[in-house]
Image (cartoon, rainbow, N blue to C red):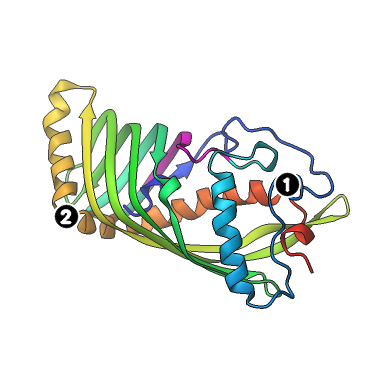
Amino acid sequence: MKLFLFTLCLVTNIYYGMAKVIPSNNVLADRVAQPCSKSVPNYDECFLDYIRKFQKQMLNGIREMNIPNFNPFHLPVFSVNRTINDMASISAEITDVKIWGFDKMEFKKFKFDPEAFTGETEVYLPQIKLSLDYDATGKLFSPSPLTDTGHFKANLTDVTGGGTFSLKTIEKMGVKYFNLDNIQLTGNVGGANVKMMSKKSENQGVADFVSNFINEDPQRVFKALAPAVQDTAETIARLIIDQILNTVPANELVPE
Protein backbone atom coordinates (compact mmCIF):
# COMPACT_ATOMS: atom_id res chain seq x y z
CA MET A 1 0.00 0.00 0.00
CA LYS A 2 3.12 2.18 -0.05
CA LEU A 3 2.75 5.42 -1.86
CA PHE A 4 -0.83 4.44 -2.56
CA LEU A 5 -0.94 7.93 -3.98
CA PHE A 6 0.83 6.60 -7.09
CA THR A 7 -0.78 3.22 -7.44
CA LEU A 8 -2.33 1.55 -10.40
CA CYS A 9 -2.54 2.40 -14.07
CA LEU A 10 -3.40 5.80 -15.55
CA VAL A 11 -5.88 5.53 -18.42
CA THR A 12 -6.66 9.12 -19.25
CA ASN A 13 -5.25 12.65 -19.43
CA ILE A 14 -1.86 12.79 -17.72
CA TYR A 15 -1.65 16.53 -18.06
CA TYR A 16 -4.26 17.26 -15.35
CA GLY A 17 -5.56 20.17 -17.34
CA MET A 18 -2.11 21.66 -17.77
CA ALA A 19 -0.96 23.38 -20.95
CA LYS A 20 1.28 21.75 -23.50
CA VAL A 21 4.02 24.23 -24.25
CA ILE A 22 6.74 24.52 -26.86
CA PRO A 23 9.93 25.13 -24.90
CA SER A 24 11.97 28.25 -25.54
CA ASN A 25 15.53 29.10 -24.60
CA ASN A 26 16.32 29.27 -20.88
CA VAL A 27 13.19 27.44 -19.78
CA LEU A 28 14.43 27.07 -16.21
CA ALA A 29 15.93 30.54 -15.88
CA ASP A 30 12.53 32.24 -16.07
CA ARG A 31 10.88 29.98 -13.50
CA VAL A 32 13.28 28.26 -11.09
CA ALA A 33 16.86 28.51 -9.87
CA GLN A 34 19.69 27.19 -12.03
CA PRO A 35 20.62 23.55 -11.27
CA CYS A 36 24.07 22.69 -9.99
CA SER A 37 26.92 22.70 -12.47
CA LYS A 38 28.60 19.35 -13.09
CA SER A 39 31.90 20.86 -11.94
CA VAL A 40 30.67 22.12 -8.57
CA PRO A 41 32.39 20.56 -5.51
CA ASN A 42 30.18 18.20 -3.47
CA TYR A 43 27.76 17.78 -6.36
CA ASP A 44 25.43 15.40 -4.48
CA GLU A 45 25.08 17.81 -1.58
CA CYS A 46 24.45 20.70 -3.94
CA PHE A 47 21.89 18.70 -5.93
CA LEU A 48 19.99 17.60 -2.81
CA ASP A 49 19.79 21.21 -1.64
CA TYR A 50 18.54 22.22 -5.09
CA ILE A 51 15.86 19.53 -5.11
CA ARG A 52 14.62 20.64 -1.69
CA LYS A 53 14.30 24.24 -2.89
CA PHE A 54 12.70 23.17 -6.16
CA GLN A 55 10.19 21.07 -4.19
CA LYS A 56 8.77 24.21 -2.58
CA GLN A 57 8.42 25.93 -5.95
CA MET A 58 6.66 23.01 -7.61
CA LEU A 59 4.17 22.36 -4.79
CA ASN A 60 1.46 24.45 -6.43
CA GLY A 61 2.43 23.39 -9.94
CA ILE A 62 4.41 25.07 -12.72
CA ARG A 63 2.18 25.16 -15.77
CA GLU A 64 4.92 25.98 -18.27
CA MET A 65 6.86 22.87 -17.21
CA ASN A 66 3.85 20.52 -17.12
CA ILE A 67 4.27 20.12 -13.35
CA PRO A 68 0.88 19.40 -11.76
CA ASN A 69 -0.40 20.85 -8.50
CA PHE A 70 0.71 18.71 -5.55
CA ASN A 71 -1.30 20.61 -2.95
CA PRO A 72 -3.35 18.46 -3.23
CA PHE A 73 -2.34 16.10 -6.01
CA HIS A 74 -5.34 15.21 -8.20
CA LEU A 75 -5.63 12.17 -10.43
CA PRO A 76 -8.89 12.28 -12.43
CA VAL A 77 -9.13 8.59 -13.37
CA PHE A 78 -7.02 5.46 -13.64
CA SER A 79 -7.57 1.72 -13.78
CA VAL A 80 -5.87 -1.46 -12.66
CA ASN A 81 -6.21 -5.11 -13.61
CA ARG A 82 -3.70 -7.28 -11.83
CA THR A 83 -3.61 -10.82 -10.44
CA ILE A 84 -0.81 -11.18 -7.91
CA ASN A 85 -1.53 -14.75 -6.79
CA ASP A 86 -4.47 -17.05 -6.07
CA MET A 87 -5.39 -15.05 -2.97
CA ALA A 88 -4.81 -11.48 -4.12
CA SER A 89 -6.10 -9.78 -7.26
CA ILE A 90 -7.77 -6.52 -8.20
CA SER A 91 -9.61 -5.04 -11.15
CA ALA A 92 -10.82 -1.50 -10.60
CA GLU A 93 -11.75 1.85 -12.09
CA ILE A 94 -10.65 4.64 -9.75
CA THR A 95 -11.81 8.25 -10.12
CA ASP A 96 -11.32 11.64 -8.48
CA VAL A 97 -8.22 10.74 -6.48
CA LYS A 98 -7.05 13.53 -4.17
CA ILE A 99 -3.87 13.25 -2.10
CA TRP A 100 -2.63 15.58 0.62
CA GLY A 101 0.74 15.52 2.35
CA PHE A 102 3.36 16.48 -0.23
CA ASP A 103 3.90 19.80 1.53
CA LYS A 104 5.49 17.83 4.39
CA MET A 105 7.52 15.45 2.23
CA GLU A 106 11.22 15.28 3.11
CA PHE A 107 13.93 14.31 0.65
CA LYS A 108 16.32 12.20 2.70
CA LYS A 109 18.55 11.44 -0.26
CA PHE A 110 18.79 12.52 -3.88
CA LYS A 111 21.97 11.51 -5.67
CA PHE A 112 22.58 12.03 -9.36
CA ASP A 113 25.58 11.19 -11.52
CA PRO A 114 25.76 13.97 -14.15
CA GLU A 115 28.01 11.89 -16.39
CA ALA A 116 26.19 8.54 -16.33
CA PHE A 117 22.72 10.14 -15.90
CA THR A 118 21.82 7.75 -13.08
CA GLY A 119 20.43 8.54 -9.68
CA GLU A 120 18.71 7.38 -6.52
CA THR A 121 16.34 8.99 -4.07
CA GLU A 122 14.73 8.44 -0.66
CA VAL A 123 11.73 10.36 0.66
CA TYR A 124 9.71 10.41 3.86
CA LEU A 125 6.14 11.62 4.32
CA PRO A 126 4.92 11.81 7.93
CA GLN A 127 1.29 11.71 6.85
CA ILE A 128 -0.70 11.21 3.68
CA LYS A 129 -4.43 11.73 3.42
CA LEU A 130 -6.28 10.54 0.35
CA SER A 131 -9.77 10.10 -0.96
CA LEU A 132 -11.11 8.40 -4.09
CA ASP A 133 -14.13 6.78 -5.67
CA TYR A 134 -13.90 3.17 -6.79
CA ASP A 135 -15.66 0.51 -8.83
CA ALA A 136 -13.73 -2.64 -8.02
CA THR A 137 -13.65 -6.40 -8.00
CA GLY A 138 -10.91 -8.11 -6.06
CA LYS A 139 -9.66 -10.81 -3.72
CA LEU A 140 -7.54 -10.25 -0.64
CA PHE A 141 -6.76 -13.44 1.30
CA SER A 142 -10.19 -14.73 0.25
CA PRO A 143 -11.11 -17.51 -2.20
CA SER A 144 -14.11 -15.53 -3.51
CA PRO A 145 -13.94 -12.17 -5.29
CA LEU A 146 -15.67 -9.13 -3.82
CA THR A 147 -17.37 -6.54 -6.04
CA ASP A 148 -18.35 -3.06 -4.88
CA THR A 149 -18.60 0.62 -5.80
CA GLY A 150 -18.15 3.43 -3.32
CA HIS A 151 -15.84 5.95 -1.70
CA PHE A 152 -12.50 5.26 -0.05
CA LYS A 153 -10.53 7.50 2.29
CA ALA A 154 -7.31 6.83 4.16
CA ASN A 155 -4.86 8.35 6.57
CA LEU A 156 -1.39 6.87 6.10
CA THR A 157 1.50 7.60 8.44
CA ASP A 158 5.28 7.20 8.29
CA VAL A 159 5.33 6.61 4.54
CA THR A 160 8.77 5.95 3.07
CA GLY A 161 9.66 5.68 -0.57
CA GLY A 162 12.74 5.39 -2.68
CA GLY A 163 14.06 4.32 -5.99
CA THR A 164 16.74 4.29 -8.62
CA PHE A 165 16.51 5.73 -12.10
CA SER A 166 18.47 6.36 -15.26
CA LEU A 167 17.96 8.91 -18.01
CA LYS A 168 18.55 8.80 -21.74
CA THR A 169 18.78 11.65 -24.22
CA ILE A 170 16.44 12.20 -27.15
CA GLU A 171 16.58 14.89 -29.79
CA LYS A 172 13.70 17.11 -30.92
CA MET A 173 14.17 19.78 -33.57
CA GLY A 174 17.92 19.70 -32.98
CA VAL A 175 17.64 20.10 -29.20
CA LYS A 176 18.53 17.33 -26.74
CA TYR A 177 16.14 16.43 -23.92
CA PHE A 178 16.10 13.77 -21.23
CA ASN A 179 13.60 10.94 -20.94
CA LEU A 180 13.45 8.27 -18.30
CA ASP A 181 15.24 5.11 -19.37
CA ASN A 182 14.65 2.94 -16.30
CA ILE A 183 12.98 3.49 -12.94
CA GLN A 184 12.53 1.16 -9.96
CA LEU A 185 10.55 2.24 -6.91
CA THR A 186 10.27 0.79 -3.42
CA GLY A 187 8.58 1.88 -0.22
CA ASN A 188 6.55 1.15 2.86
CA VAL A 189 3.84 2.53 5.11
CA GLY A 190 4.09 2.59 8.89
CA GLY A 191 0.43 2.84 9.82
CA ALA A 192 -2.95 3.20 8.14
CA ASN A 193 -6.52 4.02 9.00
CA VAL A 194 -8.88 3.49 6.08
CA LYS A 195 -12.62 3.65 5.59
CA MET A 196 -14.62 2.24 2.68
CA MET A 197 -18.14 3.55 2.17
CA SER A 198 -20.18 1.46 -0.25
CA LYS A 199 -22.82 3.01 -2.49
CA LYS A 200 -24.91 -0.10 -1.85
CA SER A 201 -26.22 -0.49 1.69
CA GLU A 202 -26.21 -4.26 1.35
CA ASN A 203 -22.45 -4.17 0.71
CA GLN A 204 -21.46 -1.95 3.64
CA GLY A 205 -20.80 -4.95 5.84
CA VAL A 206 -18.24 -6.25 3.34
CA ALA A 207 -16.73 -2.77 3.01
CA ASP A 208 -16.37 -2.56 6.79
CA PHE A 209 -14.73 -5.99 6.85
CA VAL A 210 -12.14 -4.96 4.24
CA SER A 211 -11.48 -1.66 6.05
CA ASN A 212 -10.94 -3.43 9.37
CA PHE A 213 -8.75 -6.06 7.73
CA ILE A 214 -6.45 -3.38 6.34
CA ASN A 215 -6.40 -1.38 9.58
CA GLU A 216 -5.49 -4.43 11.67
CA ASP A 217 -2.21 -5.02 9.82
CA PRO A 218 -1.32 -2.54 7.04
CA GLN A 219 2.05 -4.25 6.52
CA ARG A 220 0.37 -7.54 5.65
CA VAL A 221 -1.79 -5.85 3.02
CA PHE A 222 1.12 -3.88 1.61
CA LYS A 223 3.23 -7.01 1.19
CA ALA A 224 0.38 -8.72 -0.65
CA LEU A 225 -0.23 -5.80 -3.00
CA ALA A 226 3.39 -4.63 -3.37
CA PRO A 227 3.95 -6.01 -6.92
CA ALA A 228 0.87 -4.23 -8.27
CA VAL A 229 1.69 -1.04 -6.39
CA GLN A 230 5.29 -1.00 -7.62
CA ASP A 231 4.47 -1.68 -11.28
CA THR A 232 1.79 0.99 -11.47
CA ALA A 233 3.72 3.53 -9.44
CA GLU A 234 6.57 3.22 -11.92
CA THR A 235 4.21 3.60 -14.88
CA ILE A 236 2.60 6.76 -13.52
CA ALA A 237 5.93 8.21 -12.37
CA ARG A 238 7.36 7.69 -15.85
CA LEU A 239 4.46 9.49 -17.51
CA ILE A 240 4.63 12.46 -15.15
CA ILE A 241 8.40 12.80 -15.16
CA ASP A 242 8.72 12.49 -18.94
CA GLN A 243 6.13 15.24 -19.42
CA ILE A 244 8.28 17.50 -17.25
CA LEU A 245 11.58 16.50 -18.87
CA ASN A 246 10.14 17.17 -22.33
CA THR A 247 9.85 20.88 -21.53
CA VAL A 248 13.45 21.54 -20.45
CA PRO A 249 16.54 21.01 -22.65
CA ALA A 250 19.09 18.59 -21.19
CA ASN A 251 21.84 21.19 -21.01
CA GLU A 252 19.70 23.32 -18.71
CA LEU A 253 19.08 20.44 -16.32
CA VAL A 254 22.73 19.39 -16.27
CA PRO A 255 24.79 22.50 -17.04
CA GLU A 256 28.55 22.28 -17.49
Residue 108, position as x, y percentages in the image: 45, 65
In the depicted structure, whether residue 20 falls above or below residue 37 = above
In the depicted structure, whether residue 210 falls above or below residue 231 = above
Element at label 2:
loop
Which residue is drawn at the image coordinates 88% and 54% (left, top)? Answer: 174
Residue 75 highlighted magenta (yes or no) = yes
Q: Is 84 left, or right, of 42 in this rendering?
A: left
Q: Is 67 left, or right, of 132 in this rendering?
A: right
In the depicted structure, whether residue 44 falls above or below residue 189 = below
**Position of the C terminus by quadrant:** bottom right
Helix, strand or loop: magenta stretch: strand
What segment is highlighted magenta in the picture?
68-81
Badge 2 is on which residue?
A: 217
Q: Is residue 227 visible?
A: yes
Which residue is drawn at the image coordinates 28% and 36% (left, top)? Answer: 153
Residue 34 highlighted magenta (yes or no) = no
Q: Are marks 1 and 2 in contact (CB under 8 Å)?
A: no
Element at label 1:
loop
> 243 or 202, which is in the foreground?
243
Residue 40, position as x, y percentages in the image: 71, 74
The amino acid on which the numbered mark 1 sits, given as a three-letter code, is: Thr
CA distance for labels 1 and 2: 42 Å
Badge 1 is on which residue?
A: 247
Residue 84, position as x, y percentages in the image: 32, 55
The amino acid on which the numbered mark 2 sits, given as a three-letter code, is: Asp
| The quadrant where residue 224 appears | bottom left
